[in-house]
Image (cartoon, rainbow, N blue to C red):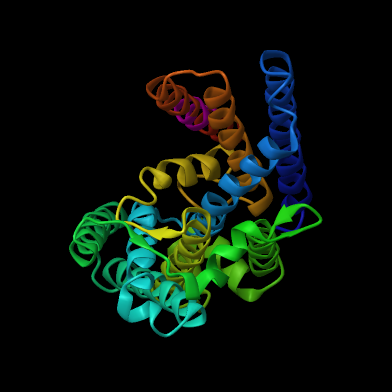
Amino acid sequence: MRGTVPVLRGVGEMRHLGLVAALAILVVVGLVTRPDNFATASNLISILSLAATIGVITVGATFVIIGGGIDLSVGAVMALASVWATTLATQSYGPVVMAICAILVGTGAGLVNGWLIAYGRLVPFIATLAMLVAARGLAQRMSDRRTQLIQAENSAIVDLSTSRVLGIPLLVYIFALVVVLGWILLNRTTFGRRTYAVGGNPEAARLAGIDVRRHTMLLYALSGMCCGIAAILIMARTTTGSSTHGDLYELDAIAAVIIGGTLLTGGRGTIIGSILGLLIFTLITNLFILNGLNTSDQLIAKGLIIVVAVLLQRRNLKERAP
């Protein structure tokens, strides 16, 4: 078992090098096709700001998928958290309570997902699909399908997007902090080791003394908490709470995790790989926008990338099989 660790690390490093190479190619494409716009400070800040919101969700999705699950509800849960945090009742208590509310709503939705999967024995796809529909519907009902503006007295939330340190918005630093904490949790704690064990072989993990059901529920709670944090970031960027926030974010988050090398069957993956995958998707989106390409074509391109990534995973698994 110990002898396989260096091999796995080597495979992970090679995977990361491939992702870095893909990023470099996209940067070259941007410099060639839009030399006047791509390398500007404003565009780079735009890329980082967009990556920050989806990136926080991607960190949570990485834990869930390594643990052998899937979460289709992340975008809808983020929308629900943003709506709940921007109701007049919540806003009357100030920005700190708004932020806490968003995190609690996200975590609560994640706990419901986790309980349904771990103790209710529902398939993750079905449970989180149901949450996707229910959370989006509840957000629409709470907001009456209207966009809720952040009031002037709660501008501290908006300041996360407008205030800058060394020219970089505060929300990017929040994203970086979540990534660092996620990496530590996954690679330097018992929780992280148990996540790999549960995703790799749930029965073996159970026999080793791990409470698989409890751990599964905690993984979805962690994903929900990340959705709550992402809700704060999107409120800062848009100055609103809306039931339309996070549309198709589950696509970008799951795709970033897959492209980053995390197995859909669980048991293997890295935070760094997921973030590199996220940056690839964010750059693709940015290049499509700068070049005035159709949004439909962008979705088609992303879909093809996901298919190729999954096919490469299957091929690698077959090659390593004894």
Question: Residue 210 location in percent, x, y?
Answer: 50, 76
Main SS of the magenta segment?
helix
At x 66% / y 56%, what residue is drawn?
172
Q: Is residue 12 visible?
A: yes
Lateral position of residue 251 relative to residue 208, left or right? left
Question: Residue 109 location in percent, x, y?
Answer: 33, 70
Question: Residue 279 location in percent, x, y?
Answer: 63, 39
Q: Quadrant of residue 242?
A: bottom left
Q: Please tell me which residue lies in front, 292 or 277.
A: 292
At x 61% / y 48%, what residue is drawn?
49
Q: Quadrant of residue 190?
A: bottom right
At x 38% / y 72%, what residue is drawn?
85
Question: Residue 232 location in percent, x, y?
Answer: 49, 65
Q: In the orientation shown, which residue stands out farthest toward the top?
A: 32
Q: Is residue 267 visible?
A: no
- Count how many numbered circles sit on residues in the image: 0
Q: Quadrant of the C terminus?
A: top right
Q: In the orientation shown, which residue stands out farthest toward the right?
A: 166
Q: Quadrant of the N terminus?
A: bottom right
Q: In the image, which residues are magenta? A: 306-312
Lateral position of residue 276 relative to residue 231, left or right? right
Q: In the orientation shown, which residue stands out farthest toward the bottom?
A: 93
Rendered position, 248 above or below 268: above
Task: Assess whether residue 310 is covered by the magenta stretch.
Answer: yes
Q: Quadrant of residue 186?
A: bottom right
